[in-house]
Image (cartoon, rainbow, N blue to C red):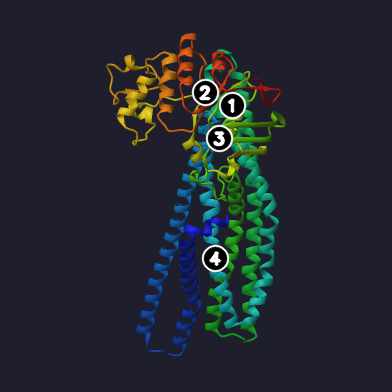
Amino acid sequence: MMYLFKGKYKKHFILYFVVCIFLALLIVGDSFLLQFIVANSFNGSKNFSTIVFFVAIFIILQAFGYFLQGYMSEKIIKLISSDLRENIFINIFDTKGLTNTDDDISQEIVALTTQLETFEVSYLNTILWGEYLFCQFLLAVIASLIIKPVFVIIILILSVPSLSVAILSKKAISECRKDVILNQEKFISSTVDFIQGSRNIIYFNSKDEIYKKFIRNKENMLKSQLKGAKVNAKTDMFNKFSSAILYYGIWLVGSYFIIIGNMNLAQIIAFTQLVSSISFPLHMVLGLTSDYYNGKEVKKYLEKYINFNFERRKNSNEIEFKEIAIKNLNFSVNDVKLLNNVNLSLQFNRKYVLLGESGSGKSTFVNLLFNNKSDFTGEILIDDIDIRKIDRSQLFDNIGYFPQKNYIFNNSIRENLTVFNNKIKDEDLILAIRNVGLSEWFLNKSLDDVISENSFNLSGGERQRFLLARLLLRRYKFLILDEIFTGLDKENILYIEELLSKLDIGFLVITHTSKNLLNFVDDILEIRKNNILKIN
């Protein structure tokens, strides 16, 4: 995730590194300050007030350094987390909105919120804290070279057990965290699913079976968590053991040098502080190992929802939107082929109808046309440009879509028709209402009247016409109308067909019910055996 250290975050990380160097210098400087105090005391120095002054300044600088380090660390974490939340929201809103149900999205948001909090604590905090510890360790080693070079070699030798623990525990911690995430995700998803389907479960008297499944999912999650706890405990035990080897080993070496008279008291005290500045980062690195690898697995989980390597996408100004060319298109889900070797051309100035039975792959085809699924083979081109290189928002600016599941917002008629686009004029809204034959319904209403999904007081056909008015208000170059006739009586079907016949732009109607469209469309397409064929 190197993107975190580039671009908009680069200045923050550079400043944080400078703060880390500043604080580490003060921490390591403790040893030289103590050496100075002791040396002057034994020399009978009378400048005690001067020493007190320097100590006071040093304490103030250290406190300020800790403040800067803590504040900068929290600031970076919150900035990145805020951007990640925005990125995740946009990604789910943009890519999942056509394929997922509201329930699916809510489950994902619950899981993502939990994992993002872990990511903050485990991954980001570990990286930033590790950056500071590295600075402290490096400067302490340099200072040790000044006092007693041989000590550096000894310290590094004694550090081998500590570093070995960190390396050897990597795989076990990573696997455990991966298992925990998988079982947590499964538990949350199934629990939400059971609660949302509780009415059916009660009606079918399946409560006992569901409870057993709940318990099984809960126990699997607990089992993975306990396994992770055991691995963490073992790692912590070896961490403490290796840290003790480092700590007491250094003290034994220091005692030996005192015995042979190679160090004076002031040097010993200074060295004692340096030992702490060296051993503490090593000890903390081991403690942070578990957090880091936990966070790394969470990072992988988040990367399923965020594409961090965005390829520059084509702007609509570079595209005329004249044709969709489909070449050798194949798409499968769980090894089940839904579309097989589809070759098709959709001209934006022509009218099409796509026939197909329920489950034949019509909705899948729509999602591919809007770049909502990218794991296909073959090509989908708009004006010879790969659809995956075109910004999805630009697709929606030029290609209008009438989905199977349309939604009426709990808001005004104006906002429902414009979908919160305040650039559309009121007179255009009223004209659109008239054009779809809803003048009588609108007679005693205003554009400010609030409507909702549950209080729309229109028939199914009138509702579809209202939603069609929403679509026709925009200046689209092509329309895709997915099952617009579903649930309508013959009268409303004929009315909507008449509206479509008068359109001066091309469209693709996806349906399995209406036959009257065949009289005025240019081309009739049909899904047969996972392929799309022209039949007229």
**Res 210 visible:** yes
Instruction: Check residue 133 in the rendering and tell me which mark sits there, or answer none.
Output: 4
Front position among marks 2 and 4: 2
Residue 115 percent location from the top left of the image = 54, 43
Q: Which residue is mark 3?
A: 370
Q: Against 137, is 111 above or below?
A: above
Q: Is 64 positioned to the left or the right of 505 in the image? A: left
Left or right for 376, reference 192: right
The residues tagged by marks 2 and 4 sit, at their Cα atoms, a distance apart of 56 Å
Give the residue number, with chain letter if any, for mark 1: 363
Q: State the CA–CA distance, disc 2 to disc 1.
A: 9 Å
> Label 1: few (<14), some or many (≥20) within 10 Å?
some
- Regarding mark 1 in the picture, which secondary structure is present there? helix
Dot 3 amino acid type: Phe
Which badge, 3 or 4, comes first in the chain's sequence? 4
Q: Residues within 10 Å of mark 3 (few under 14, many from 20)?
A: many
Marks 2 and 1, the one that precedes in the sequence: 1
